[in-house]
Image: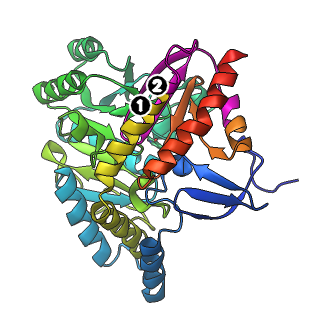
């Protein structure tokens, strides 16, 4: 019997080591990694520059405390603000923690305005994490069931429906924020026209709400822009990061700008590990590599190649619903539940994912090559076609 708590339906494989877009299991079989540990391994596996930077930092010190100044935090916050157009950063260790900080900020903002029961508008099919507040914000009953009472203070609307947001504004005077993902990741790679996000931004401005973008999955260059909101021409007041930020070393961030800046003071929030020297080194090196290796352009170009490859290869195939996404955040929606494709992919030496039941999700490392992309499409097409033909 395993002594690891049984919280995941795990696939029957474990890995030993990797290099770039390839990873090898404990039996010596090699796989093409088109998932990156769910959008985490920005630079693929064992990137030499990241390995060296982490090792060097470990040789100096791993951790101090937020009781003291942390040099890497200052540098990383400067860099993130320069890239994001934000003003301040709080460092956490994961996506749900970054979102907890954002939710606390929105409530604090409300209380400062005299709103006693501040309420945040959230979206159907959203995913914001597994802590009590973030699972309450999440739009998936499966994540919440059994954990009631949920955290109060959220109102849910259909994603992409600007009128629904407007209607909430008319009927409630305690709204303080709208929280959304520019591309819903766990929900099934759902995205809307830029006009929707711009409309949300306008409503937030009109009502002095905070616009909170959960960029945990779509941020950090994955879509071909540094942040998903830059893809659709909006600037949020709060944006959260985690997954790809440290390329595998746990780190999260809650960034603020506009009317969300300067809200928190000493004592309002904290984290023992948050932004420790090791994590900040990993994030700074990840960002440096994205810049030096042109990975924004690569994500955009290779993502387009992959989508085009599937569009051509699956043209006219019955059962294909849609191929969508930006950069290397790609969804291929089928007309039926297709979770079995994950196992078939694994058997064929491919790491892929299915989310929202019917959507094949691809999140390759941002340094995926053209050859990797061609290989991925060529090897996946027969799997998808055979599945749809059954
Ligand atoms: C993964 C994810 C989270 C949760 O991140 P954890 O690090 O697992 O807590 C939150 N929001 C989005 C959009 C995510 O994709």
Seen in the picture, residue 267 relative to 238 is either above or below; the reply is below
Q: Nearer the viewer, residue 347 or 93?
A: 347
Q: Is residue 332 magenta?
A: yes
Please indicate, yes or no, whether residue 151 appears anywhere in the rendered image: no
Name the residue at 27% across, 62% down.
Answer: 291
- Residues rendered magenta in the picture: 313-342
Q: Is residue 67 found left or right of 201 in the rendered image?
A: right
Name the residue at 42% across, 54% down.
Answer: 244
Whether the residue carrying mark 2 lies under 8 Å from ligand 1 is answered with no
Seen in the picture, residue 28 relative to 311 is either above or below; the reply is below
Seen in the picture, residue 253 relative to 304 is either above or below; the reply is below
Dot 1: within a 10 Å radius of its alpha carbon, few (fewer than 14), some, or many (20 or more) residues?
A: some
**Disc marking residue 287:** none
**Secondary structure state at the residue bearing disc 1:** helix
Name the residue at 60% across, 63% down.
Answer: 18
Q: Is residue 26 found left or right of 148 in the rendered image?
A: right
* Residue located beneath label 2 in the image: 312
The quarter of the image holding the C terminus is top right
- On the image, the x and y values in percent for residue 153 come to 38, 29
- On the image, the x and y values in percent for residue 128 come to 45, 38
* Residue located beneath label 1 in the image: 308
Name the residue at 34% across, 50% down.
Answer: 298
Q: Nearer the viewer, residue 115 or 324?
A: 324
Please indicate, yes or no, whether residue 15 appears anywhere in the rendered image: yes
Q: Is residue 159 magenta?
A: no
Q: Is residue 378 found left or right of 300 in the rendered image?
A: right
């Amino acid at each position: 019997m395993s002594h690891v708590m049984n919280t995941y339906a795990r696939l029957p494989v474990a890995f030993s080591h990797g290099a770039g877009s390839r990873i090898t299991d404990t039996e010596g079989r090699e796989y093409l990694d088109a998932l990156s540990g769910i959008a985490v391994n920005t630079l693929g596996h064992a990137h030499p520059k990241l390995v060296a930077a982490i090792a060097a930092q470990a040789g100096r010190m791993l951790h101090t405390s937020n009781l003291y100044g942390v040099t890497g935090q200052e540098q990383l916050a400067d860099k993130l603000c320069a890239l994001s157009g934000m003003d301040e950063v709080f460092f956490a260790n994961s996506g749900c923690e970054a979102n907890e900080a954002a939710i606390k900020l929105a409530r604090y903002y409300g209380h400062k305005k005299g709103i006693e029961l501040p309420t945040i508008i959230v979206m159907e099919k959203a995913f914001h994490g597994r802590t009590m507040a973030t699972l309450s914000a999440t739009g998936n009953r499966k994540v919440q069931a059994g954990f009631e009472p949920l955290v109060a203070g959220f109102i849910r609307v259909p994603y992409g429906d600007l009128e629904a947001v407007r209607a909430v504004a008319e009927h409630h005077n305690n709204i303080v924020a709208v929280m959304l993902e520019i591309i819903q990741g766990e929900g099934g790679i759902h995205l809307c026209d830029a006009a929707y996000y711009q409309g949300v931004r306008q409503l937030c401005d009109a009502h002095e709400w905070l616009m909170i973008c959960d960029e945990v999955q779509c941020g950090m260059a994955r879509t071909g822009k540094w942040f998903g909101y830059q893809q659709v021409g909006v600037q949020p007041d709060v944006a959260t990061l985690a997954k790809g930020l440290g390329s595998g070393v746990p780190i999260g961030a809650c960034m603020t700008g506009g009317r969300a800046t300067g809200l928190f003071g000493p004592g309002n929030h904290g984290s023992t590990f948050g932004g420790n020297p090791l994590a900040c080194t990993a994030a700074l090196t990840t960002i440096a590599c994205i810049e030096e290796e042109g990975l924004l352009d690569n994500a955009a170009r290779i993502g387009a190649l992959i989508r085009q490859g599937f569009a051509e290869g699956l043209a006219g195939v019955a059962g294909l619903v849609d191929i969508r996404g930006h950069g290397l955040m790609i969804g291929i929606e089928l007309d039926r539940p297709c979770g079995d494709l994950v196992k078939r992919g694994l058997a064929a030496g491919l790491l892929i994912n299915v989310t929202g039941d019917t959507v094949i999700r691809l999140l390759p490392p941002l340094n995926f090559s053209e050859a990797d992309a061609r290989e991925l499409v060529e090897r996946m097409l027969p799997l998808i076609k055979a599945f749809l033909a059954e």
